[in-house]
Every structure is written in C-alpha cells, then in structure tokens.
Amino acid sequence: MKHRLARLALLTLALAACQRDQPPPSARSSAAPSAATPAAPTAPATAAPGAISGTVVETMDAGGYTYALIDTGRAKVWVAGPQTKLAVGAALGAMSGAAMPGFHSETLNRTFDELYFIAEYALPGGAAPATPSAVAADTADVELSGKVVETMDAGGYTYALIDHGDRKFWVAGPETKLAVGESLARMSGSLMTAFRSETLKRTFDEIYFINAFPMKAQAASGAHPAAAAPAVAVEKIARAPGGKTVAEIFANKAALAGKPVVLRGKVVKESNGILGKNWLHLRDGTGAPGSDDLLVTTQASPGVGAIVVARGAVATDKDFGAGYRYDVLVEDAAITAE
C-alpha cells in the first residue's frame, strides 16, 4: 500500500507538471553548494488519498489524459487519469485519488476548483484502460541519490540532473533551492518514460518524480519536518467538541484515512517553512509511547506550548524520504489557538 500511495502522489506531480504550460525559464545553477530551503510549489505534490466511485456525468480527453465528472451520490467531483474510453452513465468502482485544488489545465484552457488525479479508472467488469504515453514504474529498489549536476525550475517544480557515480539521471520534485554540487540523500521516486514537459518544451527519456529533495546534511542533523519531538510530559487535555483524541486517531487510522478530523492538543514541537508548510507535533495526554504524538501540517505558527484545535484530513503511510516515514498524520490543518 505504501508503494501504491507513493506512486499515486508522484503520478499527480507528473500530470500537473505536464499540464502547466508556462514560458520555459532558464536553467538555474551556482558554482558552490548553499543551504537548501524548499519553497512552496504552485500546486501541492501530494494530498490525502481518498476513495472515489460513482457514475460518469461528463468526460473529455486532452493531452493524453481523460477528465471525467463523477457523481458519487453525495457530490460531483472531477477526476483525471490515463486516457481511457469512458461512456456517460458508466459506473466506476472505488478509485484512490490525490486532490489538486485550483488546478489549471492549459490544454483545456480551464481551471478546476478541485481535481483528483487517479492512477487508473476502475471500469465496469475490470476492463483495462488505454496505455498512457508516459508509463510510471515502481522504483523502490533503485538507488536515487547523488550530487546535483544541473538544475532548473519550471511551473512550480524543480528539475535536477543527479550524478550517482555510475550513472546520471533526472529527477523532478517540489520547487526547491538547489545548488550544483549539492549532495542529495536517498529519495523515493517513480520512473516516467518518454515524459513530455510542455513547460520546458522538452521530452525526457527517463525522469524520476519525487516528493521531496532530502539534503544529506539535513538528514544527518535530523532537521526534517517529520523528525520526532522531544519527550515532553503533557497533562490530559479535554477533547474538542465532536473531535478525536491522539490515541483514537492512531487506533482508527485505517478507517479515518482521507477523512476530516478535529483534534485539541498541545504543541510540543514546531518546524516552520519546510516544503512550504509548518510541521507541528501535538499531544493531548492520551496514547502510549509511539501513539501519543501526532504530526500535523499547517500554514499556522501557534508556537511551542500553545493549546490549539486542529482541523484537517487524516493521511496514512506517508514517506518523506531519508528514512522518515509516518503511519498517520493530519495534513493541511486549520489551527485555532486557545
């Protein structure tokens, strides 16, 4: 499941990069490495996955992909996936998707308030979808690390040519300040072959899409958004009205995945401005070691020691690279300090 979720998120990044058609910028490089500070991408690389199913209301093909408006019975949502023959009225099974808010397709000349990118359409009877022009492959066993040889930014993403020693390869990820000569730790990625970037007006024979650029110095020092919080005793805090406790979110993570939750807790650690987000560790006095500290991503900065109410979506099996993997966290939370 972990590899499937990683592929979904990275396929999302590939689709978004392909669709964003802006004037190609010049390649950016410098003579010596400098401290790398990730910048917020134009669209999030990853979002909490959720199950989507229902009836096709509208469908269109563009740029090698199929866009479809799905009536789930509760709401109508747009999805995009590999080009597939769909008929209005067709019933689609459960599909896992990653949300891209405010996504603009230059091919369609249209902005979607929210669009879910899926790996494939769950067709009636299990019919196979058409093969897209760019094919994602599982690269869990490939060593993706090395020194930056070349780097350029385009469409809210950073492309980098990496020298592993025995080979050179291209990677793309959220827009990040990289310097030629910078050493990158092992990355999690998916291979896209014959990938065409309309933004750069260039086709890559092979390129790996990653969810973050982990710097070796950063990984060694533990300066990572998912780094564990220090041991801090927290008194039991009353749950928010209609909310969950930290222990309950850990215990019911599978059922809560992709769903919104409300949580009241104390900020015991805060790391700001990493990958375009702030990273909070919340505790409420519930749970045992290993299930008493919940990671929350947000744009707010309440400060260590603050008692807050967080409202966000539960995500599971998130891998940030460099050995930092979390079974459960709450993403893109709205924070109210008390």
Image: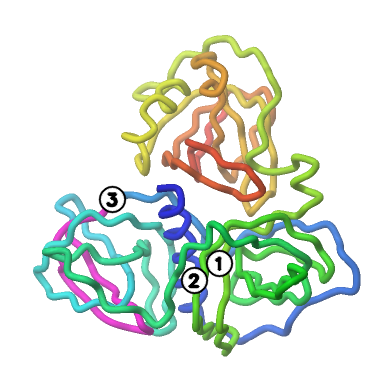
Query: How many residues crowd around disc 3 within 10 Å: few (fewer than 14), some, or many (20 or more)?
Result: few
Magenta range is 51-71
Disc 1: which residue: 209
Q: Secondary structure at mark 1?
A: strand
Tell me if 243 is positioned left or right of 43 in this view. Answer: left
- Disc 2 target residue: 14
Q: Earlier in the sequence, mark 2 or mark 1?
A: 2
Answer above or below: position of 302 versus 274.
above
Spatial CA span between label 3 and label 1: 23 Å
Q: Are marks 3 and 2 in contact (CB under 8 Å)?
A: no
Camera-side residue of 147 and 22? 147
* Residue at screen point 28% across, 82% down: 61
The residue beneath circle 3 is 51
Please say if the residues under marks 3 and 1 sit with CB atoms less than 8 Å apart.
no
Kindly give the residue lying farthest to the right in the view shown: 32
Image quarter of residue 154: bottom right
Amino acid marked by disc 2:
Ala
Real-space CA distance between mark 2 and mark 1, rounded to the nearest whole angstrom? 7 Å
Report the residue at 25% width, 73% height from top.
Answer: 129
Dominant secondary structure, magenta? strand
- SS label for mark 2: helix
